[in-house]
Amino acid sequence: MTDTYTRLVRSGPGGMLAKQLGLPRPSRLLRRHDRPEPVLGPVVVLGTSAGADAIARRLLAEGADVRRRLEDLRTVGSVLVVADELAAPAELGPLVLPFAGAVRSLAPGARVVTVSRPATGEDPARDAARGGVEGFVRSLAHELRAGGTANGVLVADGVGLDAPGVVGALRFLLSARSAFVTGQFLTVSSPAGTETENLSLPLAGRTALVTGAARGIGAAIARTLAADGARLVVLDVPGAGTELSRLANELRAVPIQLDVTSPGAGERLVAALRDRGLTLDILVLNAGITRDKLFANMTPDRWDPVLAVNITSQIALSDALLEAGDVLGEHPRVVSLASTSGIAGNRGQTNYAASKAGVMAFVDALAARLAPAGGTANAVAPGFIETEMTAKIPPVTREIARRLNSLQQGGLPVDVAEAIAFLASDEAGGIQGETLRVCGQNMVGK
Ligand code: NAD
């Protein structure tokens, strides 16, 4: 899908004018996923630590075209910088500078990924080096062109670079599945999780429920999880029943018509699952609404429904499912929908941002509750995604909103879905209470 602005500024007189005026010229089309998704190669692994050697061997064993030197390469698909042993800021330059000249040889849609350790507050020089990796990645992400992305994996001290969460995060970030994720870090805080054996169908044998699945991002999540092998339960309001049945037929999914804010919705969901003999391994809390208004004009009829759908229902549903005791699998994966508005705030969205900031704090607390049994809770924070929700934004505001990120275009629902599919996988067991932004490095933040 290419939008009108992108078509105009990519070629002909419009292209020349845009170049002269310095207007954004988005890459025509970000490369999206193929299944099973290969690492974009050739992949150059930089770094001299034992961890760098181990990762290079690992990628090689998976069939990737792995190199340890940039020389002699005309095009580079991915660069992996393994910086797990940094002790002082001066060590970062020798690690990354050899790659500076090669930035121009990066293939369209190239991936740059760092693997490093998070700051711990124990050693000022070491922490400064570790923090430096984050600044490097976030700036490089702003500089890459043609759909290239830069992201990092932060591996907690004591967790090996061969932990399932690290392997899974690398597979995700080095592939086209992370097309709209850039300038971000994923923290692997424990060695929990198990490696995926069936890379073609990583969610085979799992049952997933997606709320708000009738359209938009929810429908894309359901389709992506189904393509990854999961059995789907799709839920939406009775008013969206026709679209929901169509999706359920397409995916051979179980449809449930339910307003998640209705009294006793959690108990009714538990009863519906028991009736059908279903146990959920994956719960995606996606249903969400907006009722934008400047705070000066904010009223309870705009505030209350947004809080009710976007966060209160998530607490009620997850409480009911956890308390029931027999409708969740052994290691449940919960993924909730936040928003970049919840991170940076947004004019006219005090209600929405309050609900979405609430989601991020909620998954953090829920993660602590689920972790002892091997469950996880995380959130995904989309930026500007092309859906019916964003189609309602006035045209000029919408056009500006979709350009204000490093990839200079809006994301697609499938981009959010791919991040959720990764966080829902067995491999992501060591990723807990995180919020992953899928926003093309939206120029908002705190
Ligand atoms: P959408 O409006 O296209 O779809 C939302 C779905 O949720 C609809 O099918 C709707 O019927 C359902 N829903 C609403 N209230 C419900 C209720 N009470 N019970 C059950 N289902 C209900 O929205 P979307 O753009 O696909 O957004 C999906 C999620 O992603 C939302 O949580 C939204 O806040 C979040 N998000 C979207 C964007 C974006 O750019 N589109 C950005 C950030 C976050």
Image (cartoon, rainbow, N blue to C red):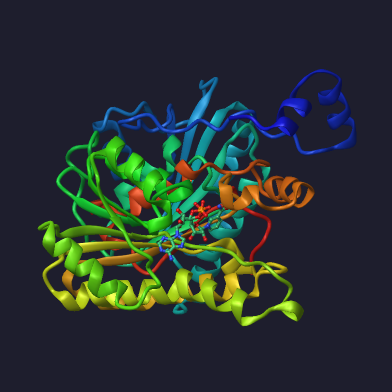
Which image quadrant for residue 339? bottom right
Q: Residue at x 30, y 44 (%)?
A: 225
Q: Residue at x 58, y 54 (%)?
A: 383
Q: How many marks?
A: 0
Q: Nearer the viewer, residue 7 or 94?
A: 7
Quarter of the rendering occupied by the N terminus: top right
x then y, percent, for residue 217: 46, 49
x then y, percent, for residue 138: 60, 54
Can you say whether 371 is above or below 61 in the image?
below
Q: Which of 278 and 36 is in front in this view?
A: 278
Q: Nearer the viewer, residue 241 or 397?
A: 241
Can you say whether 136 is above or below 75 in the image?
below
136 relative to 329 in the view: left or right = right
140 relative to 330 in the view: left or right = right
x then y, percent, for residue 261: 40, 72
Q: Can residue 157 be seen? A: yes
x then y, percent, for residue 394: 74, 51
Q: Which of 111 and 438 is in front in this view?
A: 438
Quarter of the rendering occupied by the C terminus: bottom right
Q: Can residue 164 be seen? A: no
Q: Which residue is drawn at 64% across and 33% down?
A: 101
Q: Residue at x 48, y 62 (%)?
A: 288
